[in-house]
Every structure is written in structure tokens, then in C-alpha cells.
Image (cartoon, rainbow, N blue to C red):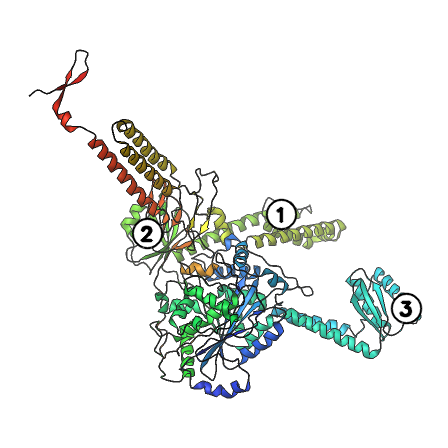
Amino acid sequence: MLRVAQSSLRSRSPVAVRSPLLRQRFSQCAAVLESSPSPALEAPATIALQGEMNVTRHNFESCFADLQRDILRPTCRFVAIDTEFTGLSPNEYEKERYLDTLEERYRKVKRSGESFLITQFGLSTVHVDKDEQFQIKTWNFYVFPRPYGTQDERFLCQASSLQFLSEHGFDFNKFIADGIPFLNLSKTTVMKKRLQRRIDGLTKVNKNLNLSEEGLAFQKEVNAKLDQWIADDAKKGEKLLLPTRNSFFSMIVHETVRAKASYLYSETADGGVEVSYVSKKIKEELIAARVKEMERELADAIGFSKVIEVLSASKKPIVGHNALLDFVYVFHQFYKPLPDTLAEFKTELLELFPSIYDTKHVTLRSPLGDQLKSTGLSSLFEYMRENVKPSPESLIPSDERFDTYRAALKDEADGNESMLCHEAGFDAFMTAVCFLGLVAHDANGVLPDQEQKEGSSARLTLRLEELESYKNQLNLMISDERSLDLGNVSQTIDRARVYRVTSTTKRRLQHVRMEDVFKTSKVQRVLRENDQNAFVVLSEPAEDVNEEAIAKLGVSITTYDDHVAAKAEEARLQKEEEEQKVFEKLSAGRAEAETHQAPVFPACTESEKVKEGESIIESEERGAGPEGVRATASPTGRHQREAKRAELQRLRDRIKEARADVDDDDAPLSSQLQVNMDPLSCLCTLRADAEPSFRRVVATNGSGVETKLLLVGPHWIGVLVTLAIILVSTGMFLAQQCADMPWYYTAMTLGLCGMTLYYLFQTTCTDPGIVRSPRLKDTTVCADDEDEAVALEAGHRATPSNSGRVEATTQLLPAPPAGGLGPRRRPAERTRYCDICDIEQDRSTDHCEDCSVCVAGYDHHCPWMGKCIGRGNMHAFKMFNVAWVLYVSFTLFVAITSVDWGRAAEQTLERTASGDWMPVPNHH
């Protein structure tokens, strides 16, 4: 997804990988391969990079010809793709929710696909040639919807996505100035018919031209000027410029010239229409040139869509990583508008690409997923790069063209994020390598020995057949359904293990342990709607619940299906009640209409007014006997009905706009809850209604945790109490002991007091490790697997790329084993979900109820520190405890040693006459 820096244009980058196990069936392709040119390979078991990689409108035609030949070759086994786009979510209510239905999820991604624009499209073709080598060729396309005719695209941009692209060196000038145009393939037929009409208009005279008086006067003026020009002995090659005000008058000039004489030729010029006096042969040549130019303009406008057309026609498997958004964007932008329903989308997407694989889904559902800390694209590629030998960096040729690529792979080897990640072409290359690596792994997720046991092509074919269970399955993020099955139009989510828990008292559900409620099933997620209601997701349907705990805690439990049915019944009853009110108002309106007076609209909704008005007009038009007929026929009645119809149409338009604005199912819920999703809102303030008066200095550390210059917790009074105890105790101690104890004791006292205060302020004023909700797409190493893919496609946070060229590479892969990837199974749960903060929690992260935020490495909430203790301030908290223990121990030591115990034992006290006590020495 990253882009490689702004260097010279690159058209393609082949990657060849030799495998000793590819032997048998590809011998059949030897004749085909020998008859067609293939790129030269550097050496056995090497990754050879050739040609250019970036493709713009200037070199698209030559690159497209190479790409088309490459895709249609029999040796091409599959194609990997990746995209970059201008945003992820058109508004804050379009976020994915764990309990979305499949239709709700589709509506959300549909709105995103209709709103944003693909800026880069990466494509890698994977071949196996006659020399038993894998070969990967990569292209990185810049695409931009240039205006053509009446087509002038509008699209949204998300600030975080543009910032992400900018931070990674994305060349916005190249994107806009040199991006490859495209047209939706569903519009090309109409465009071609329109072009044909324009071509016919160059030679045919429109005899059915209807002009207004102004148009006829202008045509007469044009005829007069042409007659005068011809009468003045116009010669061949001479030109006459006829000024026009707009395109309509230009059309009149063209039609007039075509009807005037066969030796006149007109073409649009600056300021009007230029008429030329030419011979018949030259006119035919000019028309032919003009036709060729118009056809070229249309071909240029279609542009990149031809790549999608070739991919679809080839029927080759298409591979992506966490690719639901990629396919939604590609479908809408290049193929046809997204359909209204998920079932239609599934059917039409498979018509476009019959065979689709998602490497993230394959990884998660195979045993390999349990061995990886993250299934993000970068992490998966890094695993394959380390476990499939020889390594790419050792196989890159010494040519300086490959320095950028070598540096990127070196960054990966050093544990840093590659400067080439997030560039669409390089991500497509990584996806191709990951898919080959997944094919090469056996059931245990371990690479097999490189022993030749049978024909390589037969084994590769066998392995692809074993992947049929993963075919046409797209990974779903933040959902209890693992994948979107494109082949199943009736797919539903079984939520028998989801329950709704409601508090029947004023007790907040945050203080209820759901493990106490459900006996036999493990609680996987708790999704809170508010303080009184929550959804609980179990590992399996609950066979029994703890009735005693339910009664004690004051909660009620219903199944998810019962809750949905109850909501549907409630909505039905509400609708019937509204319909009854509308019926009563309509009855009153009809009674009013019978008196042939202007209808009175009662106070009601606009949709009800529309129904009322339509019924009233219908009643008036029917009339009642002769009086009704006379009323209908009268001019006053007609005017009244026309006014009513105009009012009804206005109301219909307003209702349509309102429905479009509130089409989001989650918007009503969000507006009711009024949830503040900023996890810092409660920590970064001293009053609930006050804005923080300090300046936040943010420094992202790469793990989703931010550090602050000053971050005070909600219980800040506890900090003041702790501070007062330390200062008052120190003052009392010094006032009593300073005069008698040595100076170095005083220095040690002040030093220990200062150290205690230092660690107190460091603990209370630093970020404990707040985890914020990321909007990232899955291509960088991310702690939680589900959220990482949502956002890194458009991107958030990475290191800008200042590199030059992008070069592809090759990598030796052992032949695929005979065994399969093993049984399909759900990977072990490694995270928890916090629906309040909308993040995935790892095992060390927990939600602090007092601060209402999730904290990495959460330990406890300390009222003496005024905030929670987590990974960010744990060290300072421990040092504070060490400091005050040492301080207290030292003061006790000084106080005890300052007493002269022997002298005290030898003295007694006697009361004097004045009533005072005075010491009297003991006499033995």
C-alpha cells in the first residue's frame, strides 16, 4: 500500500523463483512458452527485477499490451491485487459493529465504495514456466477519473487517509496530473453509442433540426456570411472563423456548413467554429482523422477499466489480503454501480471474478494462523521471507536500480517497517508471495523438505483443488462471522450464543461479572449498549444459567433472537398506531373535502400529508353526483388541484431527501447514546465541563498508545491529599529534628522527600497507557488482528518513503506438499473486545471503569494517584513506592536514634509548687 518515492516511471517488475519440484505437467506448455517471449531470469533460484513499475497515462498503452499478454498466457496461475484509496468511512456512524448483520455490513461498505476513490491499483501476475520457476511480474497503476464529456466524477476524501498517503511519500501531483483515466464499464456501451452518433453527424445532415426564432435568425446570419465568403472567391485552404456564444450556436454552424456545400469542412476552434474550403479528398481525410481522434479520446477515457475487463475475461484466480473493501471499491469504480442487496452483489461479483482467494482468511482458518502473532500482510510476508529460502535480499542483482528494493527488505530484516509497504504494487507482490507460501505449507504450517516426490505441476494443481474450501471467502473484520461466503446468497449469522443482559435495578452492568451469570459457557465478549443493557457473546450456547446469581445481581437474560423478535413486534405495534392516527386524520380530511373547501392539513408528518392530499385530490376528482362533476370541471377547482399537486410533489421531494439523510441504521442509536468516543475526554480535564488548559504533546510509539506531557486523572483530589501528607509530615519532622540532627541527615531527608515527590508527579501526570481506537487497514504489524485490517488500507501512521525506484524480486519456494492445509478451524481467541472504547484488547489490556478508558498493561486504579496504573506509568509508580518506603524508614530511624534512652531511664518527673513537671535525677 505504500508508494515508492517519486522516481522514474516503471512499467513492470518480474519476479522469478526456481523450484526443484515443478516437473511434469508444464512440459505441455513448452511449445507455448518457446513461441512467446518470456523475460530473462537472472539465475536459478533468484528474484529478477525487470523494467519499470509505476504506470501512468503516459506509458499505460505500452504497459497494458504487455500486461494483457502476461495475464492471458497459460503459465499465469493467478493474479494478486491491492488498492489504495482516499478514505474508509464517509461519516462517524459508518463504523463496523460486532453484531452487524451481513446486510448491515454490506450497506456500510457500499456507502464507502460509493463515496471514495481508488488512487493506486497494484497487480502481480504469478507464472510457472517450463524451467520450473515461479515468476512474479508487478505493476503499480496511478488512476484518476479525468473528465470526459458529461462525466465529471465527485468523490470524498478522509483527512486521515490523505495524511497517511502524504506521510508515505505519495505523489499527489502524479496522481492528478498523470493518473490513468477510467470509465465505469457499465457506461462504456452508452458512450460508444453516443460516439457513433457524433461520428455519423460529421457526414450526415440533420433534416429534423428544430430551431427557435433566435436560432433561425443566427442560422440565416451564418448562411449570409458563408455566401459572402464564397462570393469573394474563397480559395482552397482558406479558413473562415465564425464566432459563437455557446455550444448550441456552434452546433447550428456545423449543421449549416454540412448542408451548404460538400467542399466546406467545419471544426470547433477557440472563439467559435472554423470553416475550411477544401477538396473532397482532403475533407475525407480530415473527417477520418477526426473520427480517429474521437475514438482515441474514448479509449483513453476508458483507460484503466480495460485492465479489469481483461482480468474478468481471463477467469484467472484473483488473490487479495483482507480484500472485502478492495473488491467493493473495484466493483463500483470500474465495473458497475453497487447493487442494493448483498445477494445481488455476491452474484455479480462472481460474474466479474469467478475465483477469489483472501490470504488473511486462509491464514486465519488454517493452523498457521495460531503460530503467528499477527496475520497482517507485513507480518505474514515477513514470516514467509524468513522461512522460505533463499532470502530475497541475498538474491537481488548488484545493479544499482535495485538499491531501493534492497534497502526496503533490509529495513524489514532489521525489524523496521519497510519503506515500500502500503504502496499498492509492492503490497500486491507481498500478497502473491504470501499466497505461494500458504500453498507451500503442509497441514502443520511447516515448510516440507525439498524432496522431489511427484510432478510439480500436478502437485500445485492438487493443492489449488484443496483450497476450494477457501475459495470465494472474504475475511470479515469485527464480526462473529469469520468470512463472507460469496457463493452463498442466503448466508446468515447464527447467533444462538449471543444473549442480551438487562439490569432490572439501578445497578450498572459494568459492575456485573458475566462469568457469574453463565455457568457452563465461557464469556468471549461483552458489548455494552448503555449502563443497563449489554450483549454477551459466549463460546457456545448456554445450557444453564446461575439463577441465584441472576436474582442477586438483579438482571434479566433473553436470547438474541428473542430480542430481535421483540424489537420487530414493538416496531409493528408502533407502525399500526401511527397508521391509525393517519387514518383518523384522513377521515377528517375527506369530510372536509366533501364540502368542496380547501383541505385543512392537521398537524402531522410530511409523509402523512402526502397520503392525505392524494386521497383528498382523488375524492375531489371523483366528486359526488352532479355537484361533484361541476366542481371538478370548474376552473377554480382545477387551479386548486394543481396547487395541491405542486405542494404534494414538494413534500415528496423533502421526504426523499430526509430518508436519504437518515438511511443509516446506527444513527438513531448513536444520537440517543451520545457516546463520547474520545478515551482521553475523562482523563485530560480537571472539571467535567471544562476543556483542558494544558497543551497536549502527542508522540505515537507505534503500538496504539500515546504519551502526553500532562495527563491528570479524574480523582485528582487524591493526588492533593497524598501531596499534603508528604509535605506536612516532612515539615513536622524537620521542625522537631532539624536542630538536633547532623546536616547530612537534613540533606538525606530533603533528598528522599524530593525523590518521593518526583515519582509522585511522574506517576500522576503521565499517560498510563491509554489505547485509542484505530481505523487501520490490515497491512502493518498490529497488536489486534481484527482492527488492523479496517484501517491501514487508507492508512494511518507510518514512516514516509523517500526512496527512488521500486523493483520487484524473486524468491525460491519449495514445491507444494501433497498434504492439505489441514481441517478448517477457528483460530484460538487471543483478544477481547471493548465495545465502550471500540477496540480489541490483548491479554494485558483492560478497561478502567473509573476512567472509562482501556489501558495497556492495566494493573489497578489508584485513588492516591488519582488515576489508573498501567504500562505507561507502572515504573514511576513502583519507584514512588520504593521512595516513600525508604523515606518513612529513614525518618523512623532518625526519630528513634535521636532519643537518649539511657538518660531518660535515669530521670523522674516531680510536680513543682506551680504545678509544672521537672526532671529529678535518681539517687541510688
Residue 161 in view here? yes
Which tag, 2 or 1, sits closer to the chain's start? 2
Number of marks in the rendered image? 3
Q: Nearer the viewer, mark 1 or mark 3?
A: 3
Q: Secondary structure at mark 1?
A: helix
Q: Please give the residue where the numbered disc 2 appears in the rendered image.
A: 514
Res 229 label:
3
Q: Quadrant of the C terminus?
A: top left
Observer-side mark, 2 or 1, equals 2
- In the rendered structure, find residue 589 and report the number of the disc placed on it: 1
User: Could you say which quadrant of the image residue 99 lies in?
Assistant: bottom left
Marks 3 and 2, how far apart in space?
Answer: 94 Å
Residue, far left: 924
Indicate which disc, 3 or 2, sits on the residue closer to the N terminus.
3
Drawn side of residue 446 relative to residue 146, left or right: left
Q: Compared to 440, does 558 lie above or below? A: above
Mark 1 closeness class: few <14, some 14–19, many ≥20 residues within 10 Å: many
Q: Secondary structure at mark 3?
A: helix
Q: Is residue 491 visible?
A: no
